[in-house]
Image (cartoon, rainbow, N blue to C red):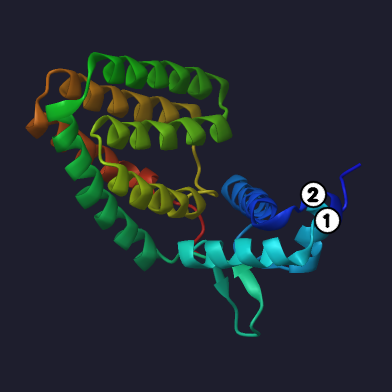
């Protein structure tokens, strides 16, 4: 049984931890599709599920509103944000610009350990693709792209792209992703890493752009418009 709110909150530090817990709980549920687009969220329900007071939940909702994963509905209720085709087009343009910067800079500064980490990610992606495990693959796909930014040693850009990746994840939750598509994405990732290992910025950038535009997969495929 979860401890009551009074047992788990000790000053500002305790409140901050509870806000982080509520934020992670709601964000993860959105990323997994457990809270689909249009879902109405209630502070009291989330607080009850977590065994905490409504205050940290309210703060967590505020963070997710700023992040763009939640929005205020016509009746002033908090709902999970939807993404229209226009939103998806904008997401793709931003990814191309920002991830392109990361790829080019990574060619100058990434280490051999960084390359090994990216190749290990691809091995895990291929395993998830073979198993048809879409959830695991999406996690690995997100980690792969953010790992390139980490290798480029661009922490501010990493924070920006982490938020953008949240949009990407939600926008393509209902996309069709058969095993062959997942395997194709892994192949595209491998071409990016091959170019990164050679420190060939032009080829790495070209491989990234081709990957992002390929078959609409990057921003939701042929899933439902939202």
- Residue at 15% across / 36% down in the picture? 105
Percent position of residue 41, x then y: 70, 66
Left/right placement of residue 93 relative to residue 222 reads: left
Q: How far apart are the two marked residues, 2 and 1, measured between alpha carbons? A: 5 Å
Q: Looking at the image, which residue sits at the far bottom?
A: 75
Query: Which mark identifies residue 119?
Result: none
Residue 128: horizontal and vertical position, in percent? Answer: 52, 23
Vertical arrangement, residue 226 with respect to residue 99, above or below: below
Element carrying mark 2? helix
Query: In percent of the image, x 40 and y 47: which residue is there?
Result: 162
x and y, in percent, of residue 48 in the image: 84, 58
* Structural crowding at the residue carrying mark 1, measured as other residues with C-alpha within 10 Å and reported as few (<14), some (14–19) or many (≥20): some
Residue designated by label 1: 5
The image quadrant that residue 180 belongs to is: top left
The image position of residue 193, as x and y in percent, is 24, 23
| Drawn side of residue 161 relative to residue 135, left or right | left
Asked if the residues shown at circle 2 and circle 1 are in contact, with their CB atoms under 8 angstroms apart, the answer is: yes
Q: Which residue is mark 2?
A: 8
Q: Nearer the viewer, residue 47 or 132?
A: 47
């Amino acid at each position: 049984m979860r401890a009551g709110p009074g047992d788990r909150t000790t000053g500002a530090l305790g409140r901050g931890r509870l806000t982080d817990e509520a934020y992670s709980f709601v964000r993860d549920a959105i990323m997994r599709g457990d809270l689909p687009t249009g879902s109405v969220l209630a502070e009291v329900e989330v607080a009850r599920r977590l065994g905490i007071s409504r205050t940290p939940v309210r703060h967590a909702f505020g963070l997710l509103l700023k992040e763009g994963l939640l929005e205020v509905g016509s009746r002033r209720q908090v709902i999970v944000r939807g993404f229209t085709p226009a939103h998806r087009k904008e997401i793709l343009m931003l990814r191309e610009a920002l991830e392109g910067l990361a790829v080019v800079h990574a060619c100058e500064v990434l280490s051999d350990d960084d390359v090994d980490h990216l190749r290990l990610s691809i091995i895990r992606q291929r395993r998830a693709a073979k198993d048809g495990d879409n959830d695991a693959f999406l996690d690995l796909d997100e980690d792969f792209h953010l790992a390139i930014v980490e290798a480029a040693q661009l922490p501010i850009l990493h924070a920006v792209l982490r938020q953008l990746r949240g949009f990407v994840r939600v926008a393509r939750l209902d996309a069709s992703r058969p095993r062959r598509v997942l395997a194709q994405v892994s192949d595209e990732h491998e071409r990016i890493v091959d170019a990164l290992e050679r420190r060939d910025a032009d080829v790495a950038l070209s491989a990234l752009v081709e990957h992002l535009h390929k078959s609409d997969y990057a921003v939701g495929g042929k899933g439902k418009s939202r």
